Image: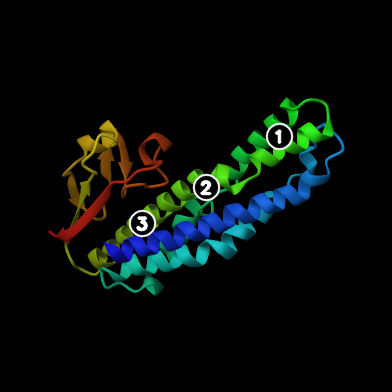
Amino acid sequence: MADNDDEDEALVGRVRDAFAEWIALVRSALRVDRVTDWTFTPSLWPDDSAWTAIVTRRVMPAARSAFARAAGALDVAASRLTNSWDQLTTATGGLLPAAGWPARLFTAVQRAWDGAAQRAADVRAAVAEVLTMERWRPISDLSGHQLAHVVRQAATQAAASVLAAAGTPLTKTWMPRADERVRAEHRQARGQTVPVSEPFEVGGFPLMYPGDPTAPPHLSINCRCRMTVRRA
């Protein structure tokens, strides 16, 4: 558990670095410290490809390391799971898609800009208040922890599938947390056991593992459940 916690914190830190770099890039692109026009200009906003590049450089290596470590817990080398890793990055839109937090930041900046009085100084103050890491660190850390969880569960699923395909009969069991924050659908899935090659049925939908990014958002976002894998 300590190793998982350390690895989670490493990935959370990389996500935090990505958020901070994006905020700095946005501040520079919008010339926040030198605003002279109170009208917001969306065309100045950095392109989504810049966010993708930041995630690829700052987050992807740590995420891939966490994926390999989780697979290694089942004695499966990550080199055997290249397709599974590619499927995960595709399903998550590149781990941290631009349609997620960067889009939310855009909306927050636009509202601050448009809501300020028609004076450049007011715009600078309002937008500068939005573009701080202090404001977004809780979202950053939540995103990092969720990403670490999904990566670990996806790697466990992928490694178990490789072992099952090689002739080792395995089952997986859904295990939610034991607290009041667990959503009803996940609580009802407690103890559900299926062959590793088959999905769980959670809330009427098939999920291959807790946090499965192909599941509806209300069943996957911020999921803290885990699965255990055993010989059948």
The residue at 46%/56% (across/down) is 12
Secondary element at image label 1: helix
Which of pointers 1 and 3 lies earlier in the amino acid sequence?
A: 1
Mark 3 belongs to which amino acid?
A: Ala
Mark 1 belongs to which amino acid?
A: Ala
Which of pointers 2 and 1 lies earlier in the amino acid sequence?
A: 1
Picture quarter containing residue 136? top right
Residue 67, how many percent across, how many down? 39, 64
Question: Residue 188 got which mark?
Answer: none
- Give the camera-side residue of 77 and 64: 64
* Mark 3 nearby-residue class (10 Å; few <14, some 14–19, many ≥20): many
80 sits to left or right of 34: left
Residue ID for mark 1: 126
Question: Residue 137 got which mark?
Answer: 2
Residue ID for mark 3: 154
| Distance CA(mark 1)–CA(mark 3) | 41 Å
49 sits to left or right of 40: left
Q: Is residue 93 above or below residue 79?
A: above
